[in-house]
Image (cartoon, helix red, strand yellow):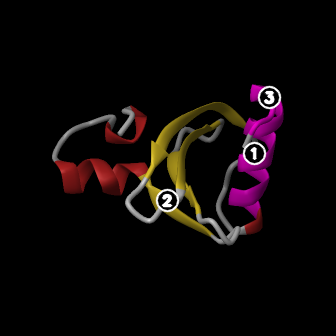
Amino acid sequence: MSRPDEDRSALLATLLRNSGERCPAATRNFYRGLDADNAAIWTVHCASGKDWEIAVEQDGKTKLLDCAFMDMLEKKRGSCWTAF
């Protein structure tokens, strides 16, 4: 996603809302890198206070993961905000 930061934040927030999640606006986003399947992994912080990880696959499909859940799995806080 080669876009200005504000545009990217707005796009990621819209993607979350269209998926049924509450994200009135994204106040921060972070590119984590590519995963093993070559999906681009982004983290977004919503104005509602929740952080999400969004995987954008090569075919354009997306997957969402609640960062609080990821923190629980990894047993550390802020795991969505570190690069691969």
Residue that label 2 marks: 38
**Is residue 4 magenta-colored?**
yes
Tell me which label, 1 or 3, sits earlier in the chain: 3
Q: Residue at x 53, y 59 (%)?
A: 39
Q: Amino acid at mark 2?
A: Asn
Task: Depth check: give the residue in front, 27 or 60.
Answer: 60
Magenta extent: 2-17
Q: Amino acid at mark 3?
A: Glu
Q: Give the left or right position of residue 41, taking residue 78 as reference.
A: right
For the residues carrying marks 3 and 2, which lies nearer the camera in this image?
2
Q: Amino acid at mark 1?
A: Pro
Report the disc number at residue 24.
Answer: 1
Residue 47, image x and y in percent? 66, 36
Q: Residue at x 39, y 34 (%)?
A: 83
Report the disc number at residue 6.
Answer: 3
Residue 1 appears in which quarter of the rendering? top right
Mark 3 lies on a secondary structure that is: helix
